[in-house]
Image: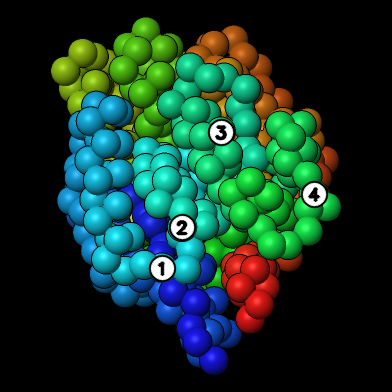
Amino acid sequence: MPHIKLINIVGARPQIIKASAIGRAIRSHFSDKITEILVHTGQHYDKELSEVFFEELEIHNPDYNLGVGSARHGRQTSMMIAGIEDVLLKEKPDCVLLYGDTNSTLAGALAASKLHFPVMHIEAGLRSFNKTMPEELNRIMSDHSSTLLFAPTKAAFENLIREGFIPENSPPFTLDNPKIYLTGDIMYDNSLYFAELAEKRKGLLLDTLSVKRGDFILVTIHREANTDDITRLEAILKTLKSLSEENKLTFVMPLHPRTTLSLKTKLESFYNELLDCKFIRIIPPVTFLEMTLLEKNSRMIITDSGGVQKESHFFRKPCLVLRKESEWIELIKNGTAVLVDANPKKIRHEFERFVNAGSELKYPGFYGDGKTAEFILKAIMGMFGK
């Protein structure tokens, strides 16, 4: 039986992690039917944020690395489109698989759809309803350039219907006759798979940080809206520092390089206060397994990351979201994640409400059964009659 040639495009840390689930499912269940070609745009290019993940998650080295690196949105995206186009013309794949909402996603969607290669979009239908966010534009444009759209949640699926996608479309599926699926979330596959591995390989990290399981707060801040707006960044971190001291709770903060740079260059005095605070543990960016370990063993998570919001739910942890909106509206409606923006009063109020909430919080199974990658690959094979 002829193989389906699938080009898997990644560029940022979350996409590399998601690709590991697809690669694992191909090796385990579909190796005689699907050939994977991995293309890394190089959107994240330093070892701490990219290469180490290929090693840690047992993903084979990329077949192509475009090495685009950092640049303004337009320039970065245009370089990616040109590089991806060259790969597509050389490899002539059956389809192109994309993840999420980065510039790599948009570049892959535009390059492939204009050359008439079917685009398969994982995490389709997510909407924050804030088009000032580059990610929101990337999501919308990628969805409307796709042939198969894999929505991770009911809310995402319903967003696609509202935008004109028809669930009952019949084959053959094309860009003008796309198919949408409710799949569950591929990151839930990874959380189940890697949680035990993280304990075995990275458990000593907790001892290194001198924290007890279930008795520390995990904080991540990386979005430009928070890191580049010093007023927002200072308001958030001063509030968190006060809460750590008042509650005598340790806050573990793996700082993104952009966050660290802003603190060092624009808030140097306060940055030194954070470093000197006995309840604050500022550490460099962590690997995926280390992050999984920290999430699983934390008491609460405070973040501006979309992915970490979901993972807080996977590990049944309350979450304060340092943004005005969230793609994961089911978490907000469920009440286990709450939008606090950069508002000190909201952060403080919701922190105090969550810190001792315990078993009163419920975590429904919004994100599937942990077999999303298999579902997606079966759907792709079905499109090609395999």
Residue carrying label 4: 167
Q: Which residue, given by chain and number where applicable, does mark 2 sit on? A: 117
Q: Secondary structure at mark 4?
A: loop
Closer to the chain start, of discs 2 and 1, is 1
Give residue 282's quadrant in the image.
Answer: top left
Q: Nearer the viewer, residue 377 or 202?
A: 377
Using residue 358 as the reference point, say whether residue 381 is left or right of it: left
Q: Of the residues shown, which amino acid type is indicated by label 3?
A: Ile
Q: CA distance from mark 2 to mark 3?
A: 19 Å
Say which label, 4 or 1, has the lower sequence index.
1
Residue drawn at 49 percent across, 77 percent down: 4
- State which quarter of the image contains the N terminus: bottom right
The residue carrying mark 1 is: 93
Say if residue 251 shows up in the picture.
no
Q: Secondary structure at mark 3?
A: helix
Question: Residue placed at 18% from the left, 22% from the top?
Answer: 264
Seen in the picture, residue 74 relative to 300 is either above or below; the reply is above
What residue is disc 3 on?
140
